[in-house]
């Protein structure tokens, strides 16, 4: 990919939930070594050995040392780390089997192995970049399988190992697309869940899988006790498997990793608390492309296997030709195989029944029995329709279906086959479900009763499939000669990379959704960072005040906190944050997020009073003295800033909350109605400040009459700091008015008081500091040039643009960061506060999509264009860095790239800004309250350690939990950074390597019970394209 976009970027068995959120990595698999037997020695030889024992032993030791170095290289030194722990029980380290030569009937030659150097990067068999380099993207017609080829088989492939077919019934329920989540629930999803419980209870051979917890939780509230018990029994009996278990099936291009973790955690926690199970298999059939970050998070959350569907059709064809549709997905930076997760890629166009039983959709459609007359689904477009199975036609029908199963099986290495059986909102009625289960069972009975067919077919779950596949891979070695594979599971290749940009047919690339509805993509990030700040405040509130009256606020807000988590989680749905839903559905998402934003801001404004000691007995219903500086009047408008109106002889408090783990010293801004004000800190010490006029987008009146007040604030890590904006305070200099320079095409410009104005001469304007000079075209307001004080910045992008695919296919997701890298090592980075799309269409060129307008439907089912564009601000932070390493050409370095430490911090400051709260009423200057600040950490954390979240996982049950129960969750990310750009980033930073941190003493003066069983303390590292 041309850019590295970083969205930075749970053990399941035998552990309680909080300690399984983010398990630590497992050790690198070790290859087995079998010492050869020694032959019997003669007496003379024995005497010789005893005589020359020392010399022989030394020689042998030296030989072994040389052999070890030649094979494995010079060993790296071991580093002691406070984050090491025992490997989770689910991660079984395997000894790799040597490849066998008798698998030619199942494995074609894997002639595109990509052996990456493991010194600093992953060693894998396949990279997605290698696939893109190799594939010609000719879009050739493959016949019945349009995007493939005419599949055939010899017939003896299953003589020694019969074909084992698992038909997996499923129903894909979008939590919003053409209808809202509530509309879908009322009309379809609740009936589907009722149907599942009823039909599965009639026959233990029937199976089903379910993914979306948003619908299951809603159904659970409405279901009778009897239905709940039936559902739970079906899950525990293995007939019904919960796959993924997230609140939704999230998007992987636009969603930030924080929101992904939150939505999976919210769904899995509800599932664990309610039904007592935690999923281990992921099912993602509908996201529009796949990120390695998602694979990494799933692996760290304890998932063992994952299934994906929507990848480029040419890529599917190439993998299918080499029987590489199943592989272990490895992070590109992982040289130790600690991130491997087994992955199944579906081979065909769609996840519906015509495209899942085999390569010929016209035939597969004949086995979608919900398309028989009498149901509400469309008939098969190929002309031949399904018919009821009976004793007269069962043989012909079964053999025809088995032929498709066999053809599909040839695309994979093993004789264990997965066949999904479902589509969007299927199994809505008992009649429909019975038609599928009844007819398929007759087909299975015929196949299974004829041993000569060498096949066994039955209904199954995803777990049934993966468990049987692993058992077969344990018995039979499917590895190819020279294949790297994985210690996780034998017989399959290893792969690294991502699967963007997705194309489903005829070179139709799905890159527009990277920027569809950018307004709501921005609101998503605002809700995300506000939720995280509120979660931290709630945890600190519980830890800071153990008295019953102090818990009133947090306990009273528990319901709204849960609702905010779920509203954020809901929008991560692959038709939510993507902007691919109908207008009224987008409105529903927007209103939900807006409501939660308001609730969270109210909670935070009340919490700061308790944490600062203003009031100790706040409740959810009592009014607050503070209000958020940012106010949104509606779900679809930009926020406005509250103005401070400090009259003569009064002051107004401003409280800043720092949600990050390092002390922040940065310039802050509030709006004031009067320019003649003074800023003081919590000790009533003067703070230098500057005032400038507030501008607006109005050609007739560019000044609002209000003013922007700036000063440099210092706020402790995860703490609060109070400042005062005063009018008439003696002994302090008033805010200094800014000097204005303007460009006007008319003579009507009027300089506002009390500012001095001067007109810009020429067509450019320059803004500079001690490091950079920015040159703007004043007529259009565009940035023209950036000049570095050390010389010109000649940044070049790594050229990964492909001429063989259309322009739209060369756009990629930019969740938060993109950078260009020059051959001299200089790096140009662009940080964003929201997800966007980015391309590098020529050298030195960075093109970022800001908005999208679609006048007509795109033919993918929505039935409308995208024309609800809204005004918005897109904020970027630009960073220039020089490489200080000795690498001659970092562009040609094949190892994965990472942000610098400074780049990490810039991104964190942009995405997790300070939260400002303003007192509702001014106070007399004669009233000087005591210093008010709050600093919970014993010391700022190292700059390469990020607190992803610090939360109370079950806020409504906090007071009822036993003291030994888990009451807090702390999730940590260990940032991986490029040491070639370390000087600026480390000027005021420590790192974990230089200053180890004792996590159990990180809080000061807070009664937070930190125990290994009560708090999830885990390290996450990721670095790569997302």
Image (cartoon, helix red, strand yellow):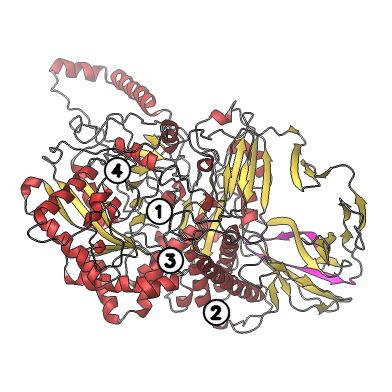
Instruction: Describe the element under mark 1 as helix, strand or loop.
Output: helix
Up-down relation of residue 505 to residue 874 (above or below): above
Judging depth in this view, the residue of 878 and 490 nearest the camera is 878
Instruction: Write the residue at 45% across / 65% down.
Output: 178
Q: Which residue is mark 4?
A: 145
Instruction: Report if the CB atoms under discs 4 and 2 are less than 8 Å apart.
Output: no
Displayed quadrant of residue 96:
top left
Foreground label between 4 and 1: 4
- Few, some or many residues within 10 Å of mark 2 (<14, 14–19, 20+): many
Is residue 967 rendered to the left or right of residue 424?
Answer: right
Cα distance, mark 1 to mark 3? 21 Å
Foreground label between 1 and 3: 3
Q: Upstream in the sequence, badge 2 or badge 3?
A: 3
Instruction: Report if the CB atoms under discs 2 and 3 are less than 8 Å apart.
Output: no
Dominant secondary structure (helix, strand or loop) of the stretch shown in magenta: strand
Does the image show residue 744?
yes
Q: Upstream in the sequence, badge 1 or badge 3?
A: 3
Up-down relation of residue 994 to residue 438 (above or below): above
Q: Which residue is mark 2?
A: 551
Q: Which residue is mark 1?
A: 298
Instruction: Describe the element under mark 2 as helix, strand or loop.
Output: helix
Cα distance, mark 4 to mark 3? 31 Å
């Amino acid at each position: 990919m041309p850019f590295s976009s970083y969205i930075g970027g749970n053990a399941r068995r035998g552990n309680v939930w909080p300690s399984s959120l983010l398990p630590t990595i497992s050790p690198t698999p070790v290859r087995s070594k079998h010492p050869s037997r020694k032959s019997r020695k003669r007496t003379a030889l024995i005497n010789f050995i005893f005589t020359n024992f020392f010399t022989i032993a030394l020689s042998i030791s030296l030989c072994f040392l040389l052999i070890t170095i030649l094979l494995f290289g010079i060993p790296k030194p071991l580093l002691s780390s406070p984050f090491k722990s025992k490997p989770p029980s689910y991660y079984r380290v395997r000894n790799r089997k040597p490849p066998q030569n008798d698998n030619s009937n199942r494995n074609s030659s894997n002639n595109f192995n990509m052996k990456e150097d493991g010194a600093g990067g992953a060693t894998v068999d396949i990279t997605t970049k290698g696939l893109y380099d190799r594939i010609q993207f000719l879009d050739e017609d493959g016949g019945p399988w349009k995007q493939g080829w005419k599949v055939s088989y010899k017939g003896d492939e299953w003589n020694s190992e019969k074909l084992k077919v698992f038909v997996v019934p499923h129903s894909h329920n979008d939590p919003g697309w053409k209808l809202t989540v509530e509309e879908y629930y009322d009309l379809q999803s609740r009936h589907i869940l009722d149907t599942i419980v009823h039909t599965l209870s009639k026959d233990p051979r029937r199976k089903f899988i379910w993914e979306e917890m948003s619908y299951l939780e809603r159904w659970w509230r409405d279901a009778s006790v009897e239905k709940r018990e039936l559902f739970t029994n079906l899950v525990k009996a293995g007939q019904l498997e919960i796959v993924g278990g997230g609140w939704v099936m999230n998007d992987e291009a636009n969603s930030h990793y924080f929101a992904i973790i939150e939505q999976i955690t919210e769904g899995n926690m509800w599932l664990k608390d309610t039904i007592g199970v935690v999923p281990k298999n992921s099912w993602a059939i509908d996201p529009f492309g796949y990120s390695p970050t998602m694979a990494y998070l799933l692996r760290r959350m304890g998932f063992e296997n994952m299934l994906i569907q929507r990848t480029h059709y040419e890529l599917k064809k190439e993998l299918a030709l080499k029987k590489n549709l199943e592989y272990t997905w490895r992070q590109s930076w992982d040289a130790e195989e600690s991130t491997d997760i087994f992955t199944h890629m579906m081979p065909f166009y769609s996840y519906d029944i015509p495209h899942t039983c085999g390569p010929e959709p016209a035939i597969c459609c004949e086995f979608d029995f919900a398309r028989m007359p009498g149901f509400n689904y469309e008939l098969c477009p190929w002309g031949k329709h399904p018919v009821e199975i009976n004793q007269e036609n069962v043989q012909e029908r079964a053999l025809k279906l088995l032929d498709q199963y066999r053809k599909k099986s040839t695309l994979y290495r093993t004789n264990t086959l997965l066949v999904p059986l479902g589509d969007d909102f299927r199994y809505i009625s008992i009649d429909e479900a019975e038609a599928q289960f009844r007819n398929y069972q007759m087909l299975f009975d015929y196949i299974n009763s004829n041993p000569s067919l060498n096949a066994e077919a039955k209904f199954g779950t995803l777990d049934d499939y993966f468990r049987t596949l692993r058992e077969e891979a344990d018995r039979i070695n499917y590895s190819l000669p020279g294949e790297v594979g994985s210690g996780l599971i034998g017989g399959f290749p290893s792969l690294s990379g991502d699967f963007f940009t997705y194309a489903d047919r005829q070179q139709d690339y799905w890159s527009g959704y990277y920027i569809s509805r950018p307004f709501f993509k921005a609101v998503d990030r605002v809700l995300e960072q506000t939720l995280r700040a509120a979660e931290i405040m709630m945890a600190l509130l519980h830890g800071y005040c153990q008295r019953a009256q102090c818990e009133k606020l947090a306990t009273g807000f528990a319901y709204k906190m849960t609702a905010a988590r779920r509203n954020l989680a809901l929008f991560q749905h692959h038709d939510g944050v993507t902007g691919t839903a109908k207008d009224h559905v987008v409105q529903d998402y927007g209103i939900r997020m807006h409501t939660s934003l308001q609730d969270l801001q109210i909670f935070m404004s009340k919490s700061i009073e308790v944490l600062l000691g203003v009031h100790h007995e706040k409740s959810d219903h009592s009014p607050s003295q503070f209000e958020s500086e940012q106010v949104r009047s509606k779900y679809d408008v930009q926020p406005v800033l509250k103005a401070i109106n400090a009259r003569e002889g009064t002051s107004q408090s401003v409280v800043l909350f720092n949600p990050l783990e390092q002390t922040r010293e940065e310039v802050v801004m509030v709006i004031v109605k009067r320019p003649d004000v003074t800023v003081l800190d919590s000790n009533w010490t003067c703070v230098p400040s500057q005032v400038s006029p507030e501008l607006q987008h109005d050609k007739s009146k560019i000044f609002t009459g209000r003013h922007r007040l700036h000063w440099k604030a210092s706020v402790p890590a995860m703490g609060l700091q109070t400042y005062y904006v005063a009018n008439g305070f003696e002994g302090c200099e008033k805010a200094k008015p800014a000097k204005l320079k303007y460009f006007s095409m008319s003579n009507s410009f009027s300089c506002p008081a009390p500012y001095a104005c001067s007109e810009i001469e020429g067509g450019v304007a320059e803004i500079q500091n001690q490091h950079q000079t920015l040159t703007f075209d004043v007529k259009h307001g565009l940035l023209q040039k950036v000049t570095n004080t050390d010389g010109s910045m000649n940044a070049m992008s790594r050229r990964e643009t492909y001429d063989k695919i259309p322009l739209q296919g060369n756009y990629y997701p930019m969740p938060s960061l993109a950078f260009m890298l020059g051959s001299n090592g200089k790096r140009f980075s662009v940080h964003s506060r929201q997800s966007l799309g980015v391309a590098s269409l020529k050298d030195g060129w960075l093109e970022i999509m800001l908005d999208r307008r679609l006048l007509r439907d795109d033919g993918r089912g929505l039935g409308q264009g995208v024309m609800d564009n809204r005004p918005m601000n897109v904020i970027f932070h630009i960073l220039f860095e020089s490489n200080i390493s000795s690498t001659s050409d970092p562009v040609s370095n094949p190892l994965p790239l990472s942000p610098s430490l400074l780049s990490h911090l810039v991104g964190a400051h942009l995405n997790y800004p300070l939260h400002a709260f303003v007192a509702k009423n001014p106070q007399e200057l004669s009233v000087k309250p005591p210093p008010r600040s709050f600093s919970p950490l014993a010391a700022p954390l190292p700059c390469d350690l990020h607190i992803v979240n610090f939360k109370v996982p079950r806020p409504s049950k906090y007071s009822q939990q036993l003291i030994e129960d888990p009451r807090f969750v702390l999730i940590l990310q260990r940032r991986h950074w490029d040491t070639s750009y370390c000087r600026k980033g480390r000027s005021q930073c420590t790192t974990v390597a230089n200053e180890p941190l004792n996590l159990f003493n990180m809080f000061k003066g807070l009664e937070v019970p930190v125990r290994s069983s009560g708090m999830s303390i885990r390290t996450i590292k990721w670095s790569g394209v997302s």
